Amino acid sequence: MSFDIFNLSLELTKALEKNNYKVPTPIQEAVIPLVKTKQDIMAQAKTGSGKTASFVIPILETLKEDEVQKKAKIKVLVLAPTRELTLQIAQTFSTLSQTFSKQLSIVSVIGGEKIGEQLLKIQKGCDIVVATSGRLVDIIGKKQIDLSTIEYFVLDEADKMLDLGFVQELDEILKIIPKNRQNLLFSATFSPKVIDIASKITNKALKVKIEDSN
Ligand code: ADP
Ligand code: MG
């Protein structure tokens, strides 16, 4: 089994090779073709199973096809629970698109860093925003971000969205992103809390569950 089964573009195939992605993991095998159906997805697989690339690969494949705009519009919004995970996801988008002739702009929106630089990058125009909810809500409050063009909304590591403030912040974010979007939710477990959050975000989500083989 190789990534060939997905019929990915040459540019993306090259990026996968460069980064030593040879064989898709089970969650990637399941999720990559499903994202193309445009349906919402709730996917569960244990930590370390490759959930990030399972959404990064199909999203990059569609962004690559989009026309180049004078100023990029934000098409992808990913929420992650921590600064570290946010940076890792942004890095995966960046390394797996390094071979593209069309350069994508990816901005990390996280706390603990000066907000000014993040605002500047957003104002210049970007394709992908990877954020922690607190800092994103701060930026929304400043009316400095246009999220009306979002096509993909990804909630990663949903079971780690533990703090109470998260649900409130999520509500703020859901108010301003388009209703007509594809929602992808990833988690290591489907606890009642995760299912509760999923019901707020997703609509008739397809459920993918990769059992732990150990
Ligand atoms: P999860 O989110 O499920 O905990 P990650 O998406 O962070 O897992 O992936 C774990 C590690 O595996 C990362 O270092 C990633 O680069 C690597 N990885 C993911 N998919 C593949 C693959 N198909 N081939 C090789 N390495 C992979
Ligand atoms: Mg992950």
Image (spheres, helix red, strand yellow):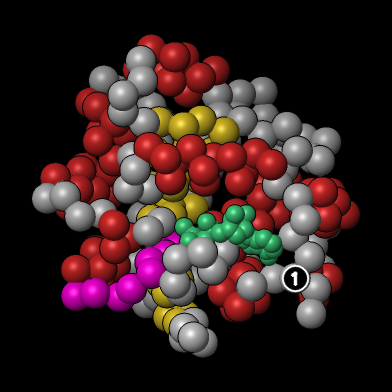
Residue 134 visible in image: yes
Q: Position of residue 88 (x, y in %)?
A: 51, 43
Look at the picture and state if 66 lies above or below 7.
above
Along the line of sight, which residue is nearer the eye, 148 or 20? 20
Query: Could you tell me residue 104's position as x and y percent?
Result: 67, 34
Residue occupied by mark 1? 23
Mark 1 residue's CB less than 8 Å from ligand 1: yes
- As drawn, 51 above or below 85: below
User: What's drawn in magenta, residue-wise?
Assistant: 181-192
Image quadrant assignment for residue 193:
bottom left
**Secondary structure category for the residue under label 1:** loop
Q: Is residue 104 left or right of residue 181?
A: right
Measured as percent of width and height from the top left, residue 123 is found at 48, 18
Residue type of the residue flagged with mark 1 = Val
Which residue ends up furthest to the front in the rendered image? 214
Please tell me in which quadrant of the rendered image residue 95 appears: top right
Q: Is residue 149 visible?
A: no
In the image, taking residue 88 as reference, residue 5 lies left or right, namely right
Q: Residues within 10 Å of mark 1 (few under 14, many from 20)?
A: few
The residue depicted at 54 percent of the width and 18 percent of the height is 124
Q: Is residue 183 above or below residue 152?
A: below
As for residue 184 lying within the magenta part, the answer is: yes
Quarter of the rendered structure image containing ligand 1: bottom right
